[in-house]
Image (spheres, grey):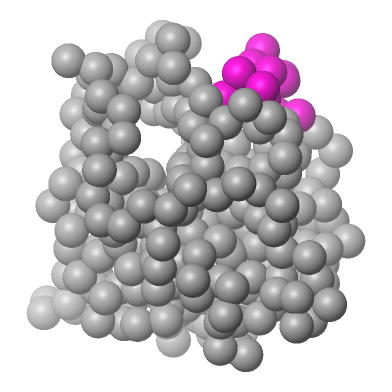
């Protein structure tokens, strides 16, 4: 029985329109600050990251005006504050390759990097509305993952005992989520397959979820939410400030 602990790291704040990004059509015109989240996962021996979070303020502000990364918020700085040297991380699982999930990968000098093959293919050749999301070369950017030796996977895999990666497309074409065994049941690190706890609230009697604002395929996105809820006793969404209410998951354990 494997038992991991999960520490959410807020790598910055992204300013978005609630109704355009978080809950489709609900809260249009309301600006909200959402965290750029990365996750440190350990059983005391293995040290794993799920995503690496976002970039410094100047670039974040280009993506979404007003977004920022305050001093000390970069992923490697936060790990060091926890007493973890980034070079100790053995595995970085990337839920997808949008800009706010994969900066500072070069800090993980000894890690393997895993991304879904479909995500990497789309990131290399996206449709134009997604150039910015991937910081694509066609905008004169160097994508944050460009010089990182990414390994691809396709489909479900228990990549380490108690750590299962499974496909959750829809927010992006090759999105994946991570089911983590803990002493309080399976916690699913959803990535942006579940943007916010608000997405898990029924929109009406016949709608068990509230649709996200951003998706590449709404049908896949819906199916992915169903799959995540089926697997997880606890769901950890990608962009909800409330996940930071707890320094570690599962909650209620001594650090
Ligand atoms: Zn995101």
Q: Where residue 156 appears, x then y in whole percent?
A: 23, 50
**Residue occupying image coordinates x 43% and y 53%:** 152
Quarter assignment of residue 34: bottom right
Q: Which residues are magenta?
A: 77-89
- In this orientation, does residue 217 appear? yes
Left or right for 125, reference 183: right
Is the magenta region chiefly helix, strand or loop?
Answer: helix
Quarter assignment of residue 59: bottom right
Q: Quadrant of the N terminus?
A: top left
**Residue occupying image coordinates x 28% and y 17%:** 3
Q: Is residue 201 above or below residue 56?
A: below
Q: Is residue 7 above or below residue 129?
A: above
Q: Is residue 233 above or below residue 23?
A: above
Left or right for 82, reference 169: right
- In this orientation, does residue 36 appear? no
Queried whether the magenta region covers residue 232, the answer comes back as no
């Amino acid at each position: 029985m494997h038992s991991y602990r999960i520490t959410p790291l807020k790598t910055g704040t992204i300013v978005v329109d609630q109704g355009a990004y978080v809950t489709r059509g609900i809260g249009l015109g309301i600006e909200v600050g959402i965290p750029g989240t990365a996750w440190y996962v350990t059983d005391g021996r293995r040290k794993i990251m799920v995503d690496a979070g976002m970039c410094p303020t100047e670039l974040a502000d280009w993506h979404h005006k007003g977004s920022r990364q305050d001093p000390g918020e970069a992923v490697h700085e936060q790990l060091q504050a926890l007493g973890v040297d980034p070079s100790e991380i053995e595995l970085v699982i990337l839920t997808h390759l949008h800009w706010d999930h994969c900066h500072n990968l070069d800090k993980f000098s000894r890690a393997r990097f895993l991304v879904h093959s479909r995500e990497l293919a789309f990131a290399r050749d996206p449709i134009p509305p997604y150039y910015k999301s991937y910081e694509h070369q066609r905008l004169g950017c160097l994508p944050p993952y460009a010089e990182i030796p990414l390994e691809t996977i396709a489909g479900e895999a228990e990549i380490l005992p108690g750590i299962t990666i499974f496909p959750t497309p829809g927010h992006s074409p090759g999105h994946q989520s991570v089911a983590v065994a803990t002493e309080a049941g399976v916690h699913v690190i959803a990535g942006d397959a579940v943007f916010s706890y608000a997405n898990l609230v029924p929109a009406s009697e016949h709608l068990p979820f509230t649709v996200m604002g951003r998706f590449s395929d709404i049908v896949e996105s819906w199916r992915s939410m169903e799959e995540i809820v089926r697997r997880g006793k606890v769901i950890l969404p990608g962009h909800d400030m409330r996940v930071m209410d707890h320094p570690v998951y599962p909650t209620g354990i001594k650090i």
